[in-house]
Image (cartoon, grey):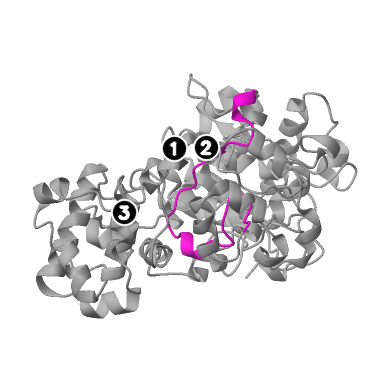
Amino acid sequence: MSVLGVSMVIATACDADAVKEAPSLRSGEVDVEPETLDSALTGSSRWQLIQQVRALIAENDIAPLELPPPVSDELFELGEALFYDKILSGNMDVSCSTCHHPRLGSTDHLTMNRGIRGVGIGPSRVGAVVGGRTTQPLWNLHKLQTGLTVDHKVPLNPDGYVIPLGGPFIPFDWQDDAFDPDMLVAAGQAMMPEVTDQEMLGFPNENDFTTACALDNPPFNFVVCAWGMMMDRLGAIPEYVDMFEAAYPGVAFEDMHFAYAGNAIAAYEFRAFFSNDTPWDRFVGRYDPDTGTLIPPDNNALTNSQLTGARHFLDEDRGNCTSCHAGNAFSDEDFHKTLAPQFGPGDTVPGGDGPGGLDDFGRMRISGDPADKYAWRTPPLRNVMYTGPWGRQSHYNDIKDFIRHYADPEDALLDYDITDSVDEVAMHTQFLENRAAIIAEGVDPILADVDVSGWWTVDYLVAFLGSLSDDAGPDFSHLIPLTVPSGLTVDR
């Protein structure tokens, strides 16, 4: 099809009503490369494409991204210090930012996280203990209110309390004392890496936390003991005492527990990692974070290729990507079986699921429902171009290969070659040959209606995903403070 032909196809719809009446053409309708379309599609043809995308935005109930709940400057500054300070780790060698680093898009660009005993950040980090899962990005956490992580191992229960791993690890009265009702899940999640051995805590008898706090089963008393010792460390630093009391007026530091720290970290994450300064947001309309006023939509914000990718992504008769990546956060927060490959060593170190403890059963680990085996939460897509490698376990260094997986998930799993898809040579031995087991559990039927085929379709989808990326990135190192109250080094 010529460029003129593309214009004629696009011209079949002149307004929202016409779009709905137009034939449900599949992805093959545009067979010119994005660079050609960007330069060739002008005037009324571009306007018609804009109108098609706007109609699809309305059909998908996509509105301007809401601002996160406001937090005081004092609470933000406390959370910032805690987020970057290694004093919260048992060995004082890792902070929240070590894995969720602003210079790396709030992730670490690794297939699996690297926690204690290491030096450096991201792909250059050496000597660290390897974790069982990929580091999750932190963008727009205010949109993920029902639970966090790919299996929702930090969910809300029906009474509105955070129950990590399905248990009352964080005392409910602590949550009543300290958690902002608008930040419950994020505050709870912020408390868990500090008491996870490989991530920040350390192993038995490795530091004062793991030596003084006796392990029990279930380990509720242990984590409360460790959190108490963290507060003792912080309380020995006058600057931290002042910051806590400024962040929580009327509460003396001696009456605080670690839930106050978790809430502060969440407050920092909500404000620092809020992203709505993207071409997509300018096209849809965006709220000014400083004034709260709505900035009107800008028809010039997206290129032709971004518009074409958006049309394919949003249209249920084309790509139907919004069947999972729904709303303005582009996640339905639900769980789906996508036949993703599996790397060991599972969810925890040591021991995950299956023979040898190297598997990871996904949502089933939390729900206990066999029907949830190998089901994973739909990831949100904000700043997705900054958070590779891509996939539930960072299976692909090239986002195009990740998108191509959805052309035929079963064939993609059977054909998957980790040596071609993952640059980290050390991870090549971690591939778990359980493809038959994954396939046997089935694929989500909804994927049968997802279509990424057609000339240049993957390129157009990548262009659209690029429009979800914040103008301030990919390096957000401007967020990093120069120092922290403990005086420990800040990962830069």
What's the magenta region? 370-395
The residue carrying mark 2 is 336
- In-image side of 41 versus 185 (left or right): left
Q: Measuring 52% from the left and 63% from the top, which residue is drawn there?
A: 399
Q: Is residue 382 magenta?
A: yes
- Are dots 1 and 2 in contact, CB under 8 Å? yes
Of the numbered discs 2 and 3, the one sitting upstream in the chain is 3
- Residue 235 coordinates in the image, percent (x, y): 67, 46
The chief SS type of the magenta part is loop
Name the amino acid type tagged 2. His
Secondary structure state at the residue bearing disc 3: loop
Kindly identify which residue carries mark 3: 26
Is residue 405 placed above or below 306 in the rendered structure?
A: above
Residue 102 at x, y percent in the picture: 54, 64
What is the crowding at mark 1: few (fewer than 14 residues within 10 Å), some, or many (at least 20)? some
Q: Nearer the viewer, residue 401 or 152?
A: 401
**Sequence-earlier tag: 1 or 2:** 2
Determine the residue positioned at 19% across, 54% down.
Answer: 54
Where is 475 relative to 418, above or below? Answer: below
Measured in 3D between alpha carbons, the distance from the residue under mark 2 to the one under mark 3, in whole angstroms, is 24 Å
Residue 446: give its label.
1
Per the model, the C-alpha gap separating discs 1 and 3 is: 17 Å
Residue 271 % position (x, y) = 42, 53
In what element is the residue under mark 1?
Answer: helix
Q: Amino acid at mark 1?
A: Ile
In this rendering, would 490 be left or right of 351?
A: left
Q: Nearer the viewer, mark 2 or mark 3?
A: 3
170 sits to left or right of 331: right
